[in-house]
Image (spheres, helix red, strand yellow):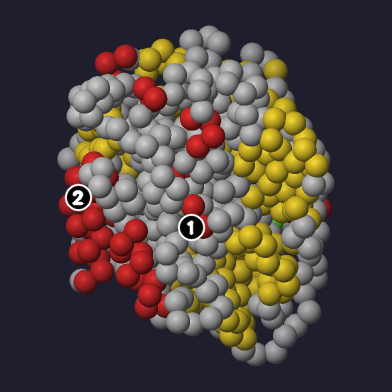
Amino acid sequence: MGANSNILAIGSNFAMIIASTKKTKWGGHAMFKLKQTLFAAACAFTVSSGSVAWSAPVTDADIVNDGKTTEDVVSNGIGTQGQHYSPLDKINAGNVAKLVPTWAFSLGSEKMRGQETQPLVRDGVIYFTGSYSRVFAIDARTGSKKWEYDARLPDDILPCCDVISRGAALYDNLVIYGTLDAKLIALDRDTGKVVWKKDLEDYTAGYTYSAAPMIVKGKVITGIAGGEFGGIGRVEARDAKTGELIWTRPTVEGHMGTLNGKDNGITGVTNATWPGDLWKTGGAATWNIGTYDPETNLIFFGTGNPAPWNSHMRPGDNLYSSSTVAIDPDTGKIVWHYQTTPHDGWDYDGVNELISFDLNKDGKVIKAGAKADRNGFFFVLDRTNGKFISATPFVSKITWASGFDATGRPKYNPESRPGAPSATGEKGPTVTVAPSFLGGKNWMPMAYSPETKLFYVPSNEWSMDIWNEPVTFKRGAAYLGAGFTIKPLYDDYIGALRAIDPTNGKIVWEYKNSAPLWGGVLATKNLVFTGTPEGYLKAFNAKTGAELWKFNTGSGIVGVPITWEMDGEQYIAIVSGWGGAVPLWGGEVAKKIKDISQGAMLWVFKLPKS
Ligand code: CA
Ligand code: CA
């Protein structure tokens, strides 16, 4: 089991590795460096096969209407609002038990590890990203490969949480995606050849890109990862056809934004919530996908933890870390923000997606947004202005705060904040806190069904021991000032898929899973699909949570399922392949997942023809 046992060893020893002030880089770095040398010899390449057919360009209207057009999936989230909902019901509660694979496609080579991607489908072709910054175009009817593009990755990239990619964007005749060495690349949809390529950031400083880009009004919108290295988060817009930069908006106060090459105002007010100089290396990485709501013309982006983790070094709220920011797509200005964890001290990145939906409350329809945060609370906001509506727990144990007051501020439990290191440099006292830093929910997207009016949240039940220790910023080195060990809360399960009523925060049904859930959710008219690390893609009754179907894909699922209609039949697709952050940083969770095999397969399902 070679590589696997290496990773597990790194995971369980992580607290020790990070606690050492002499070893300043990620524990995982050595492993990735070793792996990369095996593959770095090959240059970036495209392999094409078969005939090249011209494809209809993907338009802004196609993307905005994606949720309603069932014959394609041209955006992450099946529509820019991020609902991950399809009204299709040919596969339904009455027949889903008969669902069978129609074909499967192996990503090939030795490059397995985590497959955290959501496929896209257009004109009978499935486009998806794979681990190690690869892109595949596959014939949706036969499973045969049309082309594959492999980025040439340097051997010293610094991804914190596996060599994953969370997907691509389609626009015009392009497939646009980002690489682990922080480049943004546009490929010709028909041939896989590079059309344009831009540097997002300098990967040697710890920046990386693993999210799916988003298309808004002809612009490609990206964030950046690297907050664990003291990198500064930002959101950027480029002309999707050329890659030329239009605007950039840093997500830490004090940093200057730009529009069309000119200064466009500082983010926030310098030193208002970050005394001293720490805002200059303040984190708030924008490492997950954003959403866009055409009704309010706002981009919603989540931001990561303030850097470093040791909160005693940076008194104040530390805006705009651990927040959702609403950005005007035309100017790059922040219109509103809501901070889910002010003055974070637990790595509660606020990167989770804000999903737009209509909230029926007190006889009124409110343009709302909901977010299941790493900190364990399910937030409902007025998405027109960011006003707080409610925060309710979606996991069983939350200790860092007892709840939120009417103004949307957390009621902290002071004893759950890890103490400062001593004046002589010894680590501070350890506290046990729930949720763990991997969160009540992590990157994996939830779904919202306008049919059942429920959110379907992939959540996890775990706590952590955490302590602070001295740290100084060094370019390209981990910048945490903390150590930790993750622990399960219960013997029988960690993962829980929960159906949540956003009008009152009540959990309507739940499905418990032994291993942590790390894959996204798809809702259809009356079903909910998600994958498990144990390898199953599962279907549930959307109203009751009854498990109606499962299929073992041979490796753990951490990807995002989709559905579409083709030749009069409904299809489901998922990319299977175990990896991501859990096997790297899961601490005492490692024993729950030690027997899971790696893999890398795209699976496609449909009902047999009667
Ligand atoms: Ca569509
Ligand atoms: Ca973080």
- Quadrant location, the C terminus: bottom right
Whole-angstrom CA distance, mark 2 to mark 1, is 25 Å
Q: Is 75 in front, or is 447?
A: 75
Regarding residue 96, the answer to whether it shows in the image is no
Could you say where residue 282 lies in the image, as x and y percent from the top left? 50, 34
Res. 13 mark: 2
Q: Is 168 in front, or is 62?
A: 168
Tally the marks.
2
- Position of 363 relative to 191 (above/below): above
Q: Is 365 in front, or is 270?
A: 270
- Position of 568 relative to 109 (above/below): above
Q: Amino acid at mark 1?
A: Thr
Q: Quadrant of residue 8?
A: bottom left
Q: Residue at x 23, y 44 (%)?
A: 20
Q: Is 229 in front, or is 51?
A: 229
Q: Are marks 2 and 1 in contact (CB under 8 Å)?
A: no
Could you say where residue 428 lies in the image, as x and y percent from the top left? 23, 26
Q: Residue at x 52, y 74 (%)?
A: 152
User: Helix or strand or loop: what does disc 1 sit on?
Assistant: helix
Residue on which disc 1 sits: 204
Mark 1 residue crowding within 10 angstroms, few (<14) / some (14–19) / many (20+):
some
